[in-house]
Image (cartoon, grey):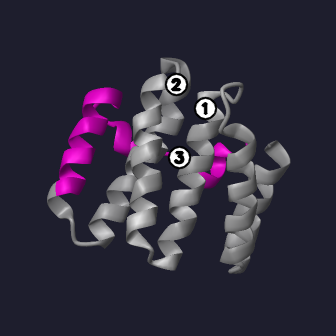
Amino acid sequence: MPELSHLAPLYRKEGDITQALAILERAWRIVDSPLGDANSRLRVLLALAVTLTTQHDNKKTESYFLRAVALLDAVPPALRQADGQAAYHAYEAFLKQNGRNREARMIEKRAVTLFGPRASSSVIGVEALFQK
């Protein structure tokens, strides 16, 4: 899975969204099993959601964000901090891009509850999650 997770952002940056999505879907098939850890599943779901934002498939994009946010409950608190902040921040940005400011504020409030009031200033980029 690590090799795949490094390739997808490269393809996305090059503008080859189709290849990035294919790699991420393959990564999802690998990590989406009872033996796959929740942290890897979270990272792949988040990468799928962020990559899909360029495709303007809002329904599918949001389904990945919702699954990622829901999966955060299964991730140990020590791992939840960076990954969780990135997931909430990316989902909030997606909602704002789609004119859903009220929902974005709710997600932001939930993030503050989980990660503290200064969480948004320490959010790392999604790509950084794949370098761990």
Disc sitting over residue 73 in the figure: none
Choose between 34 and 49: the one closer to the eye: 34
Disc 1, disc 2: CB below 8 Å?
Answer: yes
Disc sitting over residue 39 in the figure: 1
Q: State how far apart marks 1 and 2 are (Cα).
A: 6 Å
Q: Nearer the viewer, mark 3 or mark 2?
A: 2
Q: Earlier in the sequence, mark 3 or mark 2?
A: 2
Residue 12 on image: x %, y %:
68, 71
* Mark 3 closeness class: few <14, some 14–19, many ≥20 residues within 10 Å: some
Q: Earlier in the sequence, mark 3 or mark 1?
A: 1
Disc sitting over residue 75 in the figure: 2
Disc sitting over residue 124 in the figure: 3
Instruction: Say which amino acid is labelled 2.
Output: Val
Placement of 65 over or under 114, stated as above or below: below
Residue at image position (67%, 66%) is 21
Secondary structure under the numbered disc 1 in the rendered image: helix
Please indicate whether residue 24 sits to the left or right of residue 106 in the image.
right
* Mark 2 closeness class: few <14, some 14–19, many ≥20 residues within 10 Å: some
Residue at image position (52%, 76%) is 54
Residue 87 on image: x %, y %:
45, 46
Please indicate whether residue 1 sits to the left or right of residue 78 in the image.
right
Instruction: Say which amino acid is labelled 3.
Output: Ile
Choose between 35 and 112: the one closer to the eye: 35
Q: Which residues are magenta?
A: 103-132
Q: The C terminus is located in which quarter?
A: top right
